[in-house]
Amino acid sequence: TRPLRIAPSILSADFARLGAEVQAIAEAGADYIHVDVMDGHFVPNISFGAPVMTAVRGVTDKVFDVHLMIAPADPYLNDFAKGGADIITVHAEAGPHLHRSLQAIRALGKKAGVALNPATPVSAIQHVIEDCDLVLIMSVNPGFGGQSFIAESLNKIAQAKALIGGRDIDLEVDGGVTADNAREIVRAGANVLVAGSAIYAGNDPKTYAGRIKAIRDA
Ligand code: DX5
Ligand code: ZN
């Protein structure tokens, strides 16, 4: 079984102190730093782009796990790669040429991830699974932090796990993850848990280590 990774989403960080927030979460025990990029087109919200990611990349050497909720994604892959992303995830729904996008990410020397919205079946990635280093199951409709976990996602996680089989691929779950549901999510097959509000709520760095540990221990 693959190692469990906790990936706090900096979408819920205090943007006025973003560098300090990234550093604090790294010191609190985060495994990956989850970076949510939103374009106001693919999803109904705008967050930040490659310049902001690049600016905070230097405060830690943790894995930067960049989740692109943008369409098209291909024109921006180089900016995120050069800016220091380690994993770049594109949505299966973001364009007609998913295979090309995944190949482009690997050609940049980065790990290639593919994300699925709640309504998109696991079968959408059946023919590109060899081109993936990470599969991301969205357990909310992307665009905002603080939403509730969609229960049906558990079946989908299990399906994705079956598709992945013994391959060296992370199975990540994003949206509504808390210490209360982390156990069943991992039992369904996930090994990377994204959590935004469950870790960053209140934006008090003193609370971060305890909240990460609570999810890990669950
Ligand atoms: C949703 C983002 C998530 C979000 C998770 O569009 O992709 O990463 O920040 O936030 P919580 O954990 O609060 O649901
Ligand atoms: Zn995300």
Image (cartoon, helix red, strand yellow):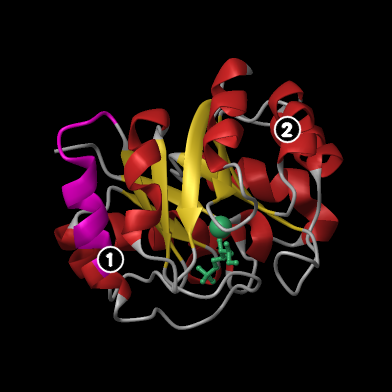
Say above or below: 187 vs 82. Answer: below
Q: Is residue 186 magenta?
A: no
Q: Is residue 89 left or right of residue 54?
A: left
Identify the residue under disc 1.
156
Q: Amino acid at mark 1?
A: Lys
In terms of depth relative to the viewer, which is nearer, 128 or 6? Answer: 128
Say above or below: 31 vs 213. Answer: above
Residue at mark 1: C-beta within 8 A of ligand 1: no
Image quadrant in which you'd find residue 137: bottom left
Image quadrant in which you'd find residue 57: top right
Rendering quadrant holding ligand 1: bottom right
Query: Residue 183 at x, y = what percent?
Result: 20, 65
Q: Which mark is residue 34?
A: none
Residue at mark 2: C-beta within 8 A of ligand 2: no
Residue 218 visible, this angle:
no
Q: Is residue 161 magenta?
A: yes
Q: Which mark is residue 80?
A: 2
* Tag 2 secondary structure: helix
| Residue sitting at x 65%, y 51% | 95
In terms of depth relative to the viewer, which is nearer, 72 or 36? Answer: 72
| Residue sitting at x 15%, y 33% | 166
Query: Residue 25 at x, y = what percent?
Result: 56, 48
Q: Main secondary structure of the magenta part?
A: helix
Q: Is residue 13 left or right of residue 129?
A: right
| Residue sitting at x 21%, y 59% | 159
In terms of depth relative to the viewer, which is nearer, 127 or 24? Answer: 127
First in sequence: mark 2 vs mark 1: 2
Q: Is residue 16 left or right of residue 187?
A: right
Between circles 2 and 1, the one closer to the viewer is 1
Q: Which residues are magenta?
A: 156-168
Say above or below: 193 vs 56. Answer: below
